[in-house]
């Protein structure tokens, strides 16, 4: 009897831990989404100024009345639906062949076509970090390459973590030809399709409600996904693989099969090799593995956690070691990570906490000594924290502007990154989108409304589902929390934020579908189906 009582106490304790973890996630996610929901209808930031090649953020007051007009329009449309329903004027379309058109697949194909069209019409060439990585990969094929990028003060000496994306460039160039940018960009389009498919698979794991069509529609309207297909960097590829890793971990939680463990580990490893930012996804994976272990006490979870950590070590250090061996050079520690935290606490003239070259300048000024650079960055952080503590109003303004510049700029830098050198003369329509024409104004307005709706719908989802006991539905939300908090501390940038914004779309789509279902059911009850 005593043994049974002890087991019951242990079970209740485990249940309590899971409930507390779930409550913390819901509270933090709810607070962040509420803040962003309010901020997004008060402010709309704009990123521009290509003359200096820097991202200058302008903080503009939003027009709240446009949201009122949109809501009134939606109410009018619902009233029209009611009138038509009352008078039996609703006509349900059927194909002449008796088959339903698969709208879901049609929308994914449409997204793919939009991506290919954007890549072909822009033919953007790489610059800044993407340009350096592309050039190094191309130089690796040259017998006369002097390897200056590997030497003291060189690009890879400063940023050895870029070895992974350089290897990706090298693989692509070996298969499709050196400097074949379109090949990389087409792979970005493939990544968009994979994100569409697997993010909607994640949505299905969250709810039995069929909200995939609304979800895909939101993804298509979220134009930055297409804008970033021309960006020769690891954002979309890493996002695709990390989303796949999340999905297969969801699968693992349901059946604890080894194949799902392996797939999830492989995909998060690839995502980390391409872009180290996806460490946030890996940490969320480990958190939920721990929660699942508390619930199920499966020993497999410990093995899963160990191989996930091993995949991180291999994915982040493997490419560095491989390039070092292949090129017979030594790549040291590079710029210490703490330098990015120090930079994230600085005024930059563009937006608070954005890139200003502090990390590289400090490293070079310290004769490329990682330890000395770390010491200087730590000293700066202590001084800055003291200043923040003594000036609370300034601190609030600083981090508010840093948040707004990342999360209330509706293009997430997608237009800005496409404003540079191209291999073609773009059409007047693209010129209007990219260079401040009427189409750009329309695109920004659409994205501004979509951004606000996603924040509000995701916030409502948290409120309406706060009593659900299934903690695993908050897996994507936990990644979002991690991304939001990380980039409030780290270097800020819209191109980092947008991949986390995508994780809110399943919640927003589900809540939108629930609202539509509620309203149509009300109409059906009153006027019949």
Image (cartoon, grey):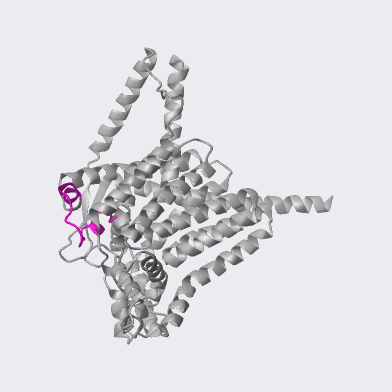
399 to the left or right of 328: left
- Residue 389 vs residue 54, the one in the foreground: 54
Q: Residue at x 35, y 21 (%)?
A: 81
- Residue 403 vs residue 127, the one in the foreground: 127
Q: Is residue 229 visible?
A: yes
- Residue 352 vs residue 280, the one in the foreground: 280
Residue 406 covered by magenta stretch: no
Instruction: Return the x and y of residue 470 as percentages of the image width and height.
Output: 58, 45
Whether residue 339 is situated above or below residue 284 in the rendered picture? below
Residue furthest top in the image: 87
Labels in figure, total: 0
Whether residue 519 is situated above or below residue 485 in the rendered picture? above
Q: Is residue 31 visible?
A: no
* Among the 4 quarters of the image, the one containing residue 421: bottom left
457 to the left or right of 476: left
Instruction: Return the x and y of residue 166 as percentages of the image width and height.
Output: 38, 71
Instruction: Return the x and y of residue 400 as percentages of the image width and height.
Output: 31, 57
Whether residue 33 is situated above or below residue 313 in the rendered picture? above
Q: Residue at x 46, y 37 (%)?
A: 211
Q: Point out the stretch of residues depicted in magenta.
A: 412-433
Q: Residue at x 60, y 52 (%)?
A: 252
């Amino acid at each position: 009897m005593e043994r049974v009582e002890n087991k019951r106490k242990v079970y209740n304790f485990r249940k309590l831990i899971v409930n507390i973890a779930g409550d913390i996630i819901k509270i933090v996610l709810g607070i962040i989404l509420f803040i962003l929901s309010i901020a997004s209808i008060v402010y709309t930031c704009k990123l521009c100024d290509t003359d200096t090649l820097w991202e200058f953020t302008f903080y503009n007051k939003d027009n709240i009345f446009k949201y009122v007009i949109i809501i009134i329009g939606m109410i009018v449309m619902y009233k029209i639906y009611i009138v038509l329903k009352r008078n039996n004027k609703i006509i349900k379309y059927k194909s002449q062949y008796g088959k339903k058109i698969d709208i879901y697949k049609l929308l994914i194909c449409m997204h793919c076509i939009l991506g290919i069209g954007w890549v072909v019409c822009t033919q953007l060439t790489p610059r800044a970090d993407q340009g350096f990585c592309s050039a190094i990969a191309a130089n690796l094929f040259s017998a006369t390459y002097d390897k200056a990028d590997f030497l003291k003060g060189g690009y890879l000496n400063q940023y050895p973590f870029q070895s992974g994306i350089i290897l990706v460039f090298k693989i692509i160039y070996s298969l499709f030809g050196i400097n074949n940018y379109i090949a990389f960009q087409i792979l970005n389009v493939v990544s968009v399709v994979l994100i569409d498919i697997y993010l909607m698979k994640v949505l299905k794991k969250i709810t039995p409600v069929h909200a995939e069509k609304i979800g895909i529609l939101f993804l298509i309207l979220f134009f930055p996904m297409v804008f970033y297909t021309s960006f020769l960097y690891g954002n979309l590829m890493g996002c695709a693989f990390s989303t796949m890793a999340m999905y297969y971990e969801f699968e693992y939680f349901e059946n604890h099969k080894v194949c799902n463990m392996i797939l999830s580990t492989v995909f998060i490893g690839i995502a980390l090799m391409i872009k180290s930012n996806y460490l946030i996804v890996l940490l969320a994976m480990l958190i939920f593995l721990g929660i699942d272990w508390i619930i199920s006490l499966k020993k497999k979870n410990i093995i899963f956690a160990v191989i996930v950590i091993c995949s991180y070590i291999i994915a982040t250090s493997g490419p560095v070691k491989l390039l070092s061996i292949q090129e017979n050079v030594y790549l040291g520690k590079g710029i210490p990570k703490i330098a990015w935290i120090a930079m994230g606490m600085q005024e930059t003239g563009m937006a608070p906490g954005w890139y200003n070259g502090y990390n590289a300048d400090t490293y070079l000024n310290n004769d490329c000594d990682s330890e000395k650079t770390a010491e200087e960055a730590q000293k700066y952080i202590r001084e800055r924290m003291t200043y923040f503590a003594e000036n609370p109003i300034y601190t609030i303004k600083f981090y508010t502007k840093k948040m707004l510049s990342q999360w209330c700029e509706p293009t997430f830098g997608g237009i800005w990154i496409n404003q540079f050198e191209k291999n073609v003369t773009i059409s007047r329509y693209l010129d209007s989108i990219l260079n401040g024409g009427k189409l750009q104004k329309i695109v920004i307005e659409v994205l501004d409304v979509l951004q606000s709706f996603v924040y509000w719908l995701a916030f409502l989802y948290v409120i309406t589902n706060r009593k659900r006991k299934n903690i695993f539905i908050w897996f994507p939300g936990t990644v979002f929390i991690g991304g939001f908090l990380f980039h409030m501390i780290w270097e800020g940038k819209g191109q980092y934020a947008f991949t986390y914004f995508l994780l809110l779309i399943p919640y927003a789509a589900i809540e939108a579908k629930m609202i539509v279902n509620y309203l149509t059911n009300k109409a059906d009850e009153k006027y019949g189906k």
